[in-house]
Image: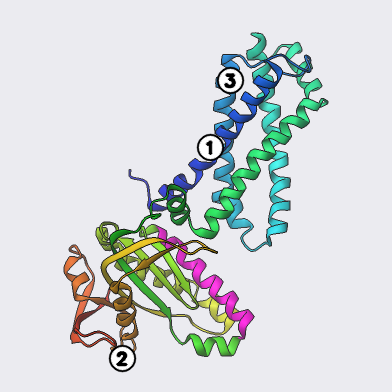
Amino acid sequence: MPLSPKTKRNISRIIPFGVIWLLTGWVFLITEFVATRNQAVVSETDITLTLPVFIYASIAITIVGLFVGTLEMVYLEKHFRKNSLRSKIFYKFLVYLVLFIVIIAINYPIAASLEQGISISSPEVWGRTKKFFLSITFLNTLFQLSISLFVSLIYAAISENLGHHVFLNFFTGKYHKPVVETRIFMFLDMKSSTTIAEALGHVRYFKLLQEYYDLMSDPIVNCQGEVYQYIGDEIVISWKLEKGLANANCIRCFFEIQDRLQSKRDRFLKNYGFEISFKAGLHYGEVTIGEVGALKKEIVFTGDVLNTTARIQSRCNQLKSDLLISGKLREALPSNSFIFKSHGMIELRGKDQKEQLFTVTL
């Protein structure tokens, strides 16, 4: 059974934790090896770095990193999303402190038994373990684990704020030099946003937007989309052409967001007094993608397709349509069960040529 896009995304976000923990672990192991010439400084608690110990430590560190990544991405990130950065760090520190002590309590006896070549059930192993927890070596181990945790949490924070795909693109330098790609864009805009904002005030309206955008996350991931920009009450979603066309992902995304929002209709009515709906325009074409900015780096898309998609979306009200797509995109889509209604050739503001537009419904 193939993995879902959400599962693939989670795996791709978790793997760097394992890599970070392995690399930082190697740094500490090699540094100690060189500094102590592989002699136990505190003979009763230190473990000599033999090849079996090194292999076991590398595997254990990587597994711990992957476990931390899974805990961070799947549970803690969601659980502490609404907390301030300070409280988020404090509570996560407590969670990981308990976790680390448990991990050390499990792994130290195993490493000690490997080094000495005796059974893990030996009283000598457990006597040494007790001395370890009362020694400076234990505090040093906690310090090393804290450094690995700090680096991985920095990665998690940057990944969360930039977006996983954007972070990887910055890290790999994919768009350091301008690159031309063919992409599908969806400009999705909340209906009656000005009226809602005036009624709720700035703070409550901002909270509504947070909930509104959070609800879109799973449908966007499930349909292999990428968030390009949040512009007030408008979101711009992008796909590489092949991903957006596959299974009509770019169209399915709109209706999955619509279904998700409809399922939370009562909650929005109760909390804000409004039923939230939206409209969207879709089109595809070539864009140039690259890094811009000196004071702040950003990956920017430029091309006529962006302007055209925005103009298509602006026609939704006039054509009484929730979802408008270009004729060009309609022709590129594979066979599907959606219903397409042609509006003929429509003039778009600021464009010399008319564009054939279609309303899409279920």
What residue did someone put label 3 on?
Answer: 54
Q: Main secondary structure of the magenta part?
A: helix
Q: Is residue 20 magenta?
A: no
Residue at image coords 34%, 85%: 314
Left or right of 75 in this view: 338: left
What residue did someone put label 1 on?
Answer: 18
Q: Is residue 206 magenta?
A: yes
Does residue 322 lie above or below 68 as drawn? below
Q: Which residues lie in the magenta part?
A: 201-221
The single residue placed furthest to the top in the displayed view is 117
Q: Secondary structure at mark 1?
A: helix
Residue at image coords 50%, 70%: 213
Left or right of 59 in this view: 243: left
Q: CA distance from mark 2 to mark 1?
A: 52 Å
Kind of residue at disc 3: Phe
Is residue 78 visible in the rendered image? The answer is yes
Nearer mark to the viewer, of 2 and 1: 1
Residue placed most toward the observer, 337 or 244 = 244
Does residue 238 lie above or below 66 as drawn? below
How crowded pointer 1 is (Cα within 10 Å; few <14, some 14-19, many 20+) is rated as: many
Kind of residue at disc 2: Gln
Kind of residue at disc 1: Gly
Residue 318 is labelled as: 2
Q: Report the quarter where the N terminus lies.
A: top left
Does residue 207 lie above or below 296 as drawn? below
Q: Secondary structure at mark 3?
A: helix
Left or right of 230 in this view: 360: left
- Please tell me in which quadrant of the rendered image residue 332 appears: bottom left
Place of residue 229 in the rendered image (x, y in percent of width and height, measured from the top left): 45, 69
Which badge, 2 or 1, is on the more N-terminal residue? 1
Residue at image coords 29%, 81%: 312
